[in-house]
Image: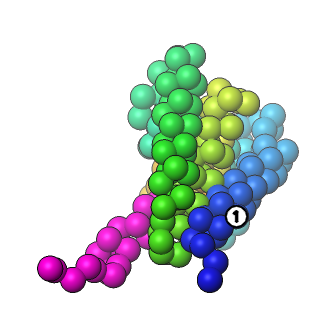
């Protein structure tokens, strides 16, 4: 039987790689283009639109301060380190996958902060004229990982009362 730890680490690596490759692709296509051309049509409900997020979720705390890189980058790195430590003791595959998704996403956004001083966001999901906040693959992985942890906590195996 494969230890869940040995599943979580590759999930984190694949998540990190897909996130960084997608951001590289978007930056190659959209960075430096006139603002009218900084989008790429994907589907009737989705565009790729370049946004550099110096804040956190939904652009909160985006004060364009240089301290944001250190503060938010440090938080992401600490979360990833704590989750990797926890991953060593995980005994369920679903939890290992969830933790891997969160770690890979956190490290992807951390690297963006170090390289660009902001997180590269580009997925613009919308319904007609209503647009959700622009996000990226790392954000999606983190959200999916958290959702899987919630599912596991609600439906996971229970210890019988003694």
| Colour pattern of the rendering | rainbow
State the residue in front, 123 or 47.
123
Magenta stretch holds residue 156:
yes
Q: Position of residue 161 (x, y in %)?
A: 16, 80
Magenta extent = 141-162
Quarter occupied by residue 155: bottom left
Q: What element does badge 1 sit on?
A: helix
* Residue in view at x 47 percent, y 21 percent: 63
Q: Is residue 69 above or below residue 82?
A: above
Relative to 150, say whether 129 is above or below. Answer: above
Q: Quadrant of residue 60?
A: top left
Q: Residues within 10 Å of mark 1 (few under 14, many from 20)?
A: some
Residue where numbered disc 1 is placed = 10
Locate the C terminus and report the quarter of the image it occupies: bottom left
Q: Nearer the viewer, residue 14 or 18?
A: 14
Q: Position of residue 117 (x, y in %)?
A: 65, 26
């Amino acid at each position: 039987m494969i230890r869940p730890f040995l599943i979580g680490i590759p999930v984190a690596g694949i998540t990190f790689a897909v996130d960084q490759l997608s951001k590289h692709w978007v930056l190659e296509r959209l960075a430096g283009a006139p603002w009218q051309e900084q989008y790429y049509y994907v589907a009737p409900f989705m565009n790729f639109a370049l946004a550099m997020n110096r804040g956190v979720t939904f652009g909160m705390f985006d004060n364009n301060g240089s301290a944001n890189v250190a503060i938010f980058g440090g938080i992401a790195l600490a979360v990833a380190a704590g989750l990797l430590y926890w991953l060593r003791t995980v005994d369920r595959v679903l939890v290992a996958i969830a933790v891997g998704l969160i770690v890979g996403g956190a490290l992807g956004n951390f690297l963006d902060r170090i390289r660009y001083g902001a997180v590269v966001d580009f997925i613009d999901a919308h319904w007609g004229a209503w647009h959700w906040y622009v996000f990226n693959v790392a954000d999606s992985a983190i959200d999916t990982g958290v959702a899987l942890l919630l599912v596991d906590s609600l439906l996971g195996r229970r210890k019988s009362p003694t």
